[in-house]
Amino acid sequence: MKEFLIQRYRPDPAGTVIHPTLIRVDDDGRIVQTDRYAEAMFGFDAGTLTGQPVHRVLASRQDDPFAPAHRHHLDNGQTVLVTFRHKDGFFFTASLGLRMEMRDSDRAANAAITLKDSADMDGRLIKLAEQGAGFGLWELDITANEISWSDGMYRLLELRPGTELSPEQALFYCQTGQNRVRALFRRCMRTGQTFSLELAITTGRQRIQRVTLAGRALKNGGRVQKLGGIMVNHSEAMQHDHARQQAQWILAATASATPDLLVAVDTSLNLLHFNTPWAQQFSSAFGTEPRPGDNLKTLLNDFPNERRLIERLWQRAFDREHFVAEVPLNRQGEGLPVYEFHFQSIRGTQGEVIGAVHVAKDISNRVQHSGSGDYRMRHDPITGLMNRRSFVEHLERAMKHKRKRQSVDGLLFMDLDGFEQFNDQAGSGTCDRYLRELASMLGLRVRNRDALARLSGDTFALFIENCPEPRARKLADEIREQIAQFQFEWQGHQLQTTASGGLLILGADTPEAPEQLLTQVADLCHTAKTSGRNRIHTAHALAGEATSLGNDHQLEQLQHALDTGDLILEFQDLKPVASVTWGDHIEILCRVPGTEPQAAPLTPDQFLPIAERFDLAKRLDRQVIRQTLDWLGQYPLLEPRLKYCGFNLSLATLLDDTFADFMEQALAKSPFLPHCFCLEIREAHAAQYPDEVTVLCDALHRVGCRVALEGAGASVESYSLAANLPVDIIKLDRRIMDDLASDPVQQIMVEALHRIAEAAGKETVATFIENDETLRKVRTLGIHFGQGYRLSRPRPLAELKPVAVDLSTGRIGG
């Protein structure tokens, strides 16, 4: 039996709270128990699910938690993403983790705990307790002068069980304190007073053990007839104490023997240990005497900038095993010593982080000597980061080795927004301190193998090595947010600003010229600034002359259309070809108008590369959706007729976590049902980012929209994607439609995709139907819808109006 914890992957913040639910599944794959949250999660009440196969709530057999691929992750304590089917028919993504596992045959029967007298306990349990806890029982019969021992006593003294001994002979094993033991025994026999004594004994194998001997009088009829007690071995615990004490002596001696600054803290930044040099330097830098147990954050209350920096350093030490940083202890003034901090996390017996330690070495002389030579030529004097010259050399080396690595890298270019106002407000000295603090914060955020540089006054660059595009996008946005949240206190005021940036994805065809890459990424940063600041624009690096993408006029033309909301929208009908279906089914198309009345509009093959190059694709997608909804909102009589309205999505939108929220807000004001809107995702993007597509599909289904896989059949992964992705519609690619009427191989491929879609409950659309022969073959194969010039040519969106009808009360529609 297995117990799984299931939690919605992307819950609706504005909707009903859906709590994580627990379900138990037996070895045959049947649900045996669910908790009270299962109904909110799946739509089924607990009684309905009990006894049902777990596949009842799974989207497909590939989502089976018992499958080998999932089982490997679950057995390692990881969670997996699984697509579930709700009772109402929609799909959603959730994370699934294994909470408990046992064989059905191993399930314990119901049991209760009751009190049992120790006299009734099985003797074997007493022996087990003695062996495990290291103790033994003894009893002295005063009248017979005989002593009785349990097995534990013989084991403590390392004697053969049953060895005959008199009380006096037993005392010989006491290395010291024999007279004390006799006196305690006599007092106990005379007064009945209990006793306890720590002493050293010598075992039968001549080994010294530290034990506690305890006893009490056993009376019968008011008279002391016997003495009984226990002897407990403390040798192991005492050895641990001695080892710990020795370690403390060694630590104290080591700390005192080095002039370096040594300090250890727990995870709450409470001081555990420090040496005299650290205490003296801390007192000199901050004017307060630290003591063991003090909290660093409390000690640095009057130094907020240093406190935040030190907190980030220690937090990084907790998160990483080891790292090195070079910073002064206090940044309030110039000329203070610079230290090389070596941080190391401290872990407990279970591997958990319980604190960290750092050793700081004064490297001021090294920095000063190197500052007059090569170091100064390769590093920024204010922040200590790489300068432009050094960064260009690093980028050039990385590009030369890129072909060998076959990896995806990123180049991030950040420019602070409105930084010149800081100079006017606080002066250049304060701005230098701000840049030093900001550089230290950014240095903690990046990985050791990445290269961070200050290129000019308020411009930074980061080379992100071997990082997939989604992770690079997320990292760039995290850095942007950290800069926006960074606060620097100056004379009771807080200096705070934002940053605009460009992120260049360096793929296989990236040019090796570093200056060309910096020019491209600087252009992206510029468009981010002109688009409103505090944002990151992302694009793929382009080689050779392709970087110009025609001319700057086309970029200006696209930006003007987006700023004015003046895109040219068209629609193309999707016609039912297998059966009669009522209503309008359309796909929205877009062109960009010229800046002059006589100028020809830009077609998608002209403006889409520009939009992707300057990270305007996400904004373009949203503008097309807004303009379409605004147009439809003028004609509410279209609402019963409109059954399908499709929009193509770019890769930038696919990777945008906020797009589903945008759709929800945009559709909230529309009289049209969300179900009639469909977002089309390219198969190439779905194959590259299947997890992101799954999450987006789940989010759009939550809003009520449908999702289409556009371009199916373009790759060998088409069949798997069509079957497993939680999309609603499969749109066939042009490459398998061009020769469909005459090519039997393409006919088989199309038929296979159609059958997979039907088996998964999805509809199919055949695109680029240009002639009667292709249309007949599409009908023969049973494809649901068709699209192409043979059926309908694109028309202006203005022609999508309800038919005008003259009534006695007036005209409606038109």
Image (spheres, rainbow, N blue to C red):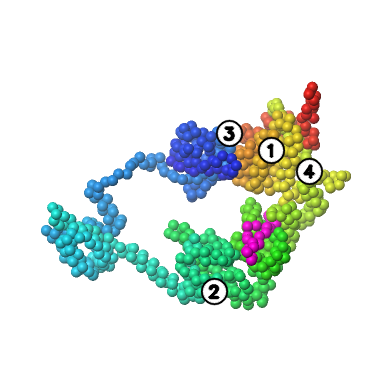
Dot 3: within a 10 Å radius of its alpha carbon, few (fewer than 14), some, or many (20 or more) residues? few
Looking at the rendering, the stretch of residues picked out in magenta corresponds to 484-511
Report which residue position mark 3 lands on.
Answer: 89
Dot 2: within a 10 Å radius of its alpha carbon, few (fewer than 14), some, or many (20 or more) residues? few
Secondary element at image label 2: helix
Dot 1: within a 10 Å radius of its alpha carbon, few (fewer than 14), some, or many (20 or more) residues? few
- Mark toward the viewer: 1 or 3: 1
Q: Give the amino acid type for the residue marked by disc 3 in the picture.
A: Gly
Q: Give the amino acid type for the residue marked by disc 4 in the picture.
A: Leu
**Closer to the camera in the image, 644 or 419:** 419
Q: In the displayed structure, does residue 215 sit left or right of residue 70?
A: left
Q: Position of residue 747 (x, y in %)?
A: 69, 34
Image quadrant for the N terminus? top left
Report which residue position mark 1 lands on.
Answer: 669
Measured along the vertical axis of the image, is residue 50 above or below residue 523? above
Nearer the N terminus, badge 4 or badge 1? 4
Nearer the N terminus, badge 2 or badge 4? 2
Residue 792 position by quadrant:
top right
Give the distance between the C-alpha atoms of the residues marked 1 and 3, in whole angstroms.
Answer: 26 Å
